[in-house]
């Protein structure tokens, strides 16, 4: 999940103890919400900075990927909100909706 620093944490849920797979800087303000795409290929993160970032899940979890050694950049950034993003929800057909304090 996300943290107040804007960093996100990817955990393995295979075992009960869990294992931290990756920490990455997703936003410059706190990460307030995240969701996976309906196809399972992407992770969307929302933040108090008003932005929604879309990341390739493969780049985040595949340690053999060229991006695994450095911080992963979002594939796309949506910056339509002017206030903190409060919720993300996936919709059918690859769409996603976001809600923010600006309405």
Image (cartoon, rainbow, N blue to C red):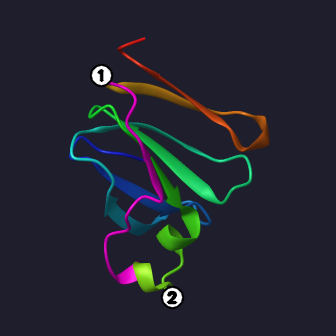
Q: Residues within 10 Å of mark 2 (few under 14, many from 20)?
A: few
How many marks overall? 2
Residue 55's place in the image compared with 51, above or below, is below
Residue 17 seen from this side: no
Residue 2 seen from this side: yes
Question: Which residue occupies the extreme top position in the image?
Answer: 103
Residue 70's place in the image compared with 66, above or below, is above
- Quadrant in the rendering for residue 14: bottom right
Q: Residues within 10 Å of mark 1 (few under 14, many from 20)?
A: some
For numbered disc 2, what is the local secondary structure? loop
For residue 71: magenta?
yes
Residue 95 is situated, as x and y percent measured from the top left of the image, at 68, 38
For numbered disc 1, what is the local secondary structure? loop
* 1 or 54: nearer the viewer: 54
Residue drawn at (45%, 60%), measured in percent from left and top?
Answer: 10
Give the labeled residue for mark 1.
Answer: 83
| Cβ–Cβ under 8 Å for marks 2 and 1 | no
The alpha-carbon separation of the residues under discs 2 and 1 comes to: 37 Å
Residue 58's place in the image compared with 43, above or below, is below
Question: Which residue occupies the extreme right position in the image?
Answer: 93
Magenta portion: prevailing SS class: loop
- Quadrant in the rendering for residue 25: bottom left
Residue drawn at (48%, 61%), measured in percent from left and top?
Answer: 11
Residue 24 is situated, as x and y percent measured from the top left of the image, at 33, 62
Magenta residues (range): 68-83
For residue 87: magenta?
no
Q: Looking at the rendered structure, which numbered label has been put on residue 64?
A: 2
Look at discs 2 and 1 and give the one toward the viewer: 1
- Quadrant in the rendering for residue 21: bottom left
Locate residue 101 relative to residue 63 in the image: left or right: left
């Amino acid at each position: 999940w996300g943290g107040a620093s804007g960093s996100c944490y990817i955990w393995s849920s295979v075992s009960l103890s869990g294992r931290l797979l990756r920490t990455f800087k997703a936003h410059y303000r706190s990460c307030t919400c995240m969701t996976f795409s309906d196809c399972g290929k992407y992770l969307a993160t929302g933040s108090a900075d008003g932005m929604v970032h879309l990341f390739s899940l493969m780049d985040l979890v595949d340690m053999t990927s060229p991006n695994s050694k450095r911080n992963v950049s979002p594939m796309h950034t949506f910056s339509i909100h002017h206030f903190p993003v409060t919720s993300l929800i996936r919709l059918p057909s690859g769409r996603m909706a976001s809600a923010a304090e600006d309405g």
